[in-house]
Structures are given as C-alpha cells and as structure tokens.
Image: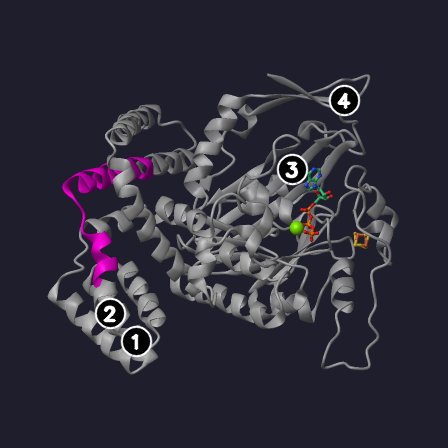
C-alpha cells in the first residue's frame, strides 16, 4: 500500500546516498567489530518523522555503546532526541509518521534493524520535493514479531509518560500480571502445578504465622510467610497469607482457617492441570520461536523451516486453546491463574516500595498519582529482570525522597542481575550519582561521550560546558550561573555543519559548512567539535 507523506525536502536530502559527505563516524564505525563486552551497540542511527510541515530529522547519525553491567547517561535539552533514540532502539517509533531510515542497533550481537531496507521504499518527487513512502507491511510485521522477542525479556523500558504507556481500561494487576505471565509464565505455571499448600512444612509455617500475628511480631510474621511461600512451592502463598495476617489485626481466631481456605485455590483439578500443561506448551513454543528470531537477527539470514515448524506447533496449541474455552475449562482455571498473578503483582509492587500494594493492584491507572504510576511502570519493566533497562526520565515526575528510592532500585537491579542501564534525564545531578559514562546529545546528534568524572571535570564540547555551567554547585557558592543563549533548533531545518554553531561562542567558518567528526580526546573520551584535533573515533 502506498502512503503519501506530505513533506518538503529541507536542509539536507533524505536519501542517505544523496547526503553530503559527512565527516561522520557512522561509516567508519560500522567497519569496526563490536567488542566482546558490548551489550548494546548503536551506529549511525537515523530516525525521521515525515510530517505535513516537513521532515523532522529527530536523530541523525547517533552512535552509542553500552557494556554489560554499565550505566550510560544520556543528557541534553528538551527536544534533543533522547526519547526518539530510546524508541528507535526498542523499535517503538510511531510509524507513520516516524521511520528509522538507517543505522545499526545490535543487542547481544543480534541486529535489531535486520532487513530494515526491505520495510519501505522512499521516492522523492523532483518537482515538489515531497517524499513518497511505500511501506511493506509484511516486512514491518515480521520486524515487530522479532522485536517482541527482544522487548521485555531482553530490553525493558520505563517510559517518560507512564499515564500514556498504560491502558486505562485494565486494572494494574491485569497489566502487570500480563507482563509477568508473558516473561515468567513457564516458571509460574511450573510452581502452580507443583504447589503443596497442605504439606507438613507449609502447615507448620502457617502455625508460626498465626502465633506471630497474635503477638503482633511483624518481622517474625514476614519471615514465616516467606517460609510458607517456600514450603508451598509458590511465593504467592506467602504474600497472600501475609496480607490476611495483617488484616486480622490481632484477632487471630479464624486466621488459620482463613489462610487454609485462601490457599485452597492452589489445589487443582485434573482438567485444570491439563489446561495449565497446554498453556505451558504454548509458552515453550513461543520461547523457542523467540530464540529462532534472535538467531536470525544474530546470523543475518532467515531460518524459515525452523520458524514454520514452531509456528505450526503454536497454531495447534491455539486451536486447543479454543476448545478448552468451549468446554468451560478455561473459565474454571482463569480465576486460579488470575489470583496467582494478583499476589505476584502485589509482591512486585512491594518491591518498588508501594505502601498499599493490594489496593494499588486492584486499582486502575487513573486512580494513581504520577509517582505511583511511575513505580508501577518500573515494577513492570523490572519484572522479567531485563539485561538492558532503558529508563526515560524515570524520576522527573517524582519528589526527591522517592527519586532516591527509585535510583536505589535501579542500582539493586544492576547488582542483582548485572543489567546495564541507559538512563535518560535532564538532571545532571542524577547522572553524577548513578551513571558510569555519559553521552551528551544536541539536536539529534551525540556531541560528546566520556566517563562521568571526566565529563564533569573536563567537559570539552562548548554545549557540555554550557550545560554544566548552568547547574548550581555546593562547592562554588559564589559562582554565577550561566545559561546557553538561544534554543534547540527546529529539526525540520537544522543548521548545516555543526548544529550547535548558532549558539556557540567559539564558532568558526568551518563549523557552518561541515559536520565535525568525533575525535578521541582521552581514554574513552570523544567529542565532535573542530576545537579538538585528536584522532577520529571508530565506535
Ligand atoms: N511523533 C512525532 N512526530 C513528529 N515529531 C516528533 C514526534 N516525536 C518526536 N518528534 C520530534 O523529535 C524531536 C526529538 O524529540 P524527543 O521526544 O526525542 O526529545 P527529548 O530529548 O526526549 O525531549 P524531552 O527532554 O523534552 O523529553 C523533537 O523535535 C520532536 O518534536
Ligand atoms: S564545531 Fe564549532 S560551532 Fe560546533 S561546538 Fe565546536 S566550535 Fe562550536
Ligand atoms: Mg523525552
């Protein structure tokens, strides 16, 4: 289907081949092999939005790399393209009007932009300079399916606008629960199938919970509940018992019976077990399909027969799914599965320091404050223990004490799972606290990258210097704060050459004509500015 994108050609032509020869590192970068410890490598990424006003060159040749277990801070003024970079990495750019035009995004060696050139054709009308895009939806759908394998399991994302990222018509437990089922479904079903709520160890733990609740020994109660979770083989049993014990409020007469009744949901009938085994097979097939996608993206060639075999397996299981619905088995197990997920969601919300997780889990997004929603988003993003967490302004909507807790949570994830973090923020104080390295973005391009200490101590790019000069410092109370004159340019008609030149106090004639290359100015310190003459960087 042809879609005409009304847009005028602006400062530089669209077609990569027709672009003026950039002293860009992207071309040179792609020649260099990714280092062993690199988790994410982004090279020469370009994402444009084709709007009626013109082509918004939102990111134009961005290159980044993040190593395993590292936190990379991405900073820049509003409209510099930080969020578009994050969305391009996870391929969540709204299409239309947006399109990733070229570049390379490699996650654990898998090329997430594999077959990008097959997704669309671009033609420019020489008279009107309007661009016509012919999208190939088969290729786009295939890319979306491949990305489903990467999002969540591999790359988790905390969005800048949590209210827009959540569905208003589903409860919090439904939304977080779905994410848990998708990413940890096999383990959850295994635990449900092997649950032993009536084992002697579980009954002994329940006795200890009742005794602790009677004396209001909260710590012991918590500990006994954890033991119950282990003894019953599903941690949700412990969480549910804890909230029953808390609600008992000292009157423990019926507590034992209440806990046993509540855990009755874990005694499954044979038809329920058959259904769960089928759900497990479906998830296993989906997992294997995701592995095939990952292999395809790593190897750069299609594995058609393996994919078709797994798709066939999934079709058969989906057919069975339909019949389980007709026979009424699905509705009988649905409640058990929902309850199981509900208590796991409560535990996940506790993990992000939500004080009343049961009420929040039952609630809907519109009932929560911005800070609460942000935490729910974080719980969702952290649930599958992602290898890379992209956090887009995760603390901007939060007050200072909550900010500290959220940053602590991210640090905990890093030390527990060894996850890497791409932290996007305006707040240089947050970067100083959390990041290992920083990339500074200006008008859709990375202008400086380096270790956090080095950038704070010796910022090289005039834009980085301006950003740092505009933050107050406790150690220099007499220093006058300065601001960078002007504002981020309109990205439909960005300035030629160095995009910062209209605001730069050191601008030279060459700055207005050609884009400065990234040069190496110290260990891991790279800057794109004609003031520096080090060797050209190869990312
Ligand atoms: N859907 C869209 N349609 C058209 N232009 C868009 C769209 N989304 C983003 N842009 C443009 O892309 C550019 C970069 O936007 P982006 O949201 O990445 O900025 P940002 O650095 O994240 O800013 P902030 O700090 O305010 O979040 C902006 O010029 C913006 O107008
Ligand atoms: S390249 Fe020129 S205009 Fe750009 S930051 Fe350096 S000195 Fe300023
Ligand atoms: Mg943003």
Residue 333: image x %, image y %? Answer: 26, 42
What's the distance in space between the residues labelled 1 and 4, CA to CA?
74 Å
From this view, report whether residue 488 is shown above or below residue 114. below
**Contact between labelled residues 1 and 2, with CB atoms less than 8 Å apart:** yes
Badges 1 and 3: C-beta atoms under 8 Å apart?
no
Question: Rounded to the nearest whole Å, what is the CA distance between mark 4 and mark 3?
Answer: 17 Å
Q: Is residue 158 visible?
A: no
Q: Earlier in the sequence, mark 1 or mark 4?
A: 4
- Identify the residue position indicated by label 2 in the image: 254
Instruction: Report the residue at 78% width, 60% height from top.
Output: 462
Question: Which residue has dot 4 on it?
Answer: 130
Question: Horizontally, is 523 left or right of 147 in the view?
Answer: right
| x and y, in percent, of residue 424 in the image | 61, 56
Residue pointed to by mark 3: 47
Q: Main secondary structure of the magenta part?
A: helix
Q: Which residues are magenta?
A: 260-287
Residue at numbered disc 1: 251
Query: Could you tell whether 350 is left or right of 255 in the image?
Result: right
Could you classify mark 4 by the number of other residues whose Cα lies within 10 Å: few (under 14), some (14-19), or many (20 or more)?
Answer: many
Residue located at (83% from left, 60% from top): 484
C-alpha separation, residue under disc 2 versus residue under disc 3: 62 Å
Structural crowding at the residue carrying mark 1, measured as other residues with C-alpha within 10 Å and reported as few (<14), some (14–19) or many (≥20): few
**Marks 2/1: CA distance?**
8 Å
């Amino acid at each position: 289907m042809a879609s005409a994108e009304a847009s005028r050609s602006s400062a530089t032509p669209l077609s990569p081949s027709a672009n003026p020869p950039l002293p860009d590192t992207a071309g040179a970068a792609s020649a260099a092999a990714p280092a062993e410890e690199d988790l994410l490598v982004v090279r020469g990424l370009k994402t444009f939005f084709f709007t009626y006003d013109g082509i918004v060159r939102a990111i134009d040749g961005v290159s980044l790399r993040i190593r395993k277990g590292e936190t990379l801070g991405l900073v820049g003024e509003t409209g510099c393209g930080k969020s578009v970079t994050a969305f391009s990495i996870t391929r969540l750019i709204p299409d239309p009007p947006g399109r990733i035009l070229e570049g390379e995004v490699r996650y654990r060696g898998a090329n997430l932009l594999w077959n990008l050139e097959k997704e669309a054709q671009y033609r420019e009308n020489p008279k009107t300079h309007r661009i016509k895009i012919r999208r190939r939806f088969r290729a786009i759908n295939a890319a979306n399916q491949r990305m489903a394998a990467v999002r969540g399991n591999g790359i988790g994302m905390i969005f800048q606008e949590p209210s827009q990222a959540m569905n208003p018509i589903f409860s919090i437990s439904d939304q977080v629960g779905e994410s848990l089922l998708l990413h940890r479904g096999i383990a959850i079903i295994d635990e449900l199938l092997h649950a032993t709520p009536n084992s002697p160890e579980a009954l002994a733990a329940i006795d200890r919970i009742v005794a602790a609740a009677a004396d209001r020994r909260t710590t012991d109660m918590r500990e006994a509940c954890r033991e119950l979770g282990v003894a019953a083989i599903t941690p949700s049993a412990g969480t549910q018992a804890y909230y029953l014990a808390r609600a008992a409020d000292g009157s423990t007469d019926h507590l034992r019976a209440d806990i046993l009744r509540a855990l009755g949901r874990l005694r499954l009938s044979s038809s329920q077990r058959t259904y769960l085994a089928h759900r497990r097979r479906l998830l296993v097939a989906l997992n294997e399909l995701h592995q095939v996608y990952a292999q395809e993206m790593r190897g750069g060639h299609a594995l058609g027969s393996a994919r078709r075999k797994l798709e066939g397996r999934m079709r058969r299981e989906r057919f069975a799914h339909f019949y389980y619905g007709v026979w009424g088995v699905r509705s009988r197990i649905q409640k058990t599965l929902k309850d199981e997920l509900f208590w796991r969601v409560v535990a996940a919300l506790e993990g992000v320091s939500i004080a009343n997780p049961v009420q929040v889990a039952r609630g809907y997004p519109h009932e929560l404050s911005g800070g609460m929603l942000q935490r729910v988003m974080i719980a969702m993003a952290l649930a599958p223990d992602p290898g890379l967490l992209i956090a887009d302004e995760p603390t901007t909507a939060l007050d200072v004490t909550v900010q500290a807790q959220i940053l602590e949570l991210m640090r905990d994830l890093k030390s527990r799972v060894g996850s890497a973090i791409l932290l996007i923020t305006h707040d240089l104080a947050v970067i100083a606290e959390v990041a290992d390295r920083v990339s500074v973005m200006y008008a859709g391009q990375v202008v400086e990258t380096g270790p956090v200490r080095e950038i704070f101590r010796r910022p090289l790019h005039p834009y980085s210097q301006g950003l740092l000069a505009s933050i107050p410092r406790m150690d220099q109370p007499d220093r006058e704060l300065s601001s960078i004159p002007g504002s981020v340019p309109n990205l439909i008609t960005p300035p030629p050459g160095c995009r910062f030149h209209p605001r730069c106090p050191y601008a030279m004639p060459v700055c207005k004509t050609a884009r400065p290359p990234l040069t190496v100015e110290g260990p891991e310190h790279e800057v794109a500015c004609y003031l520096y003459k080090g060797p050209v960087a190869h990312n």
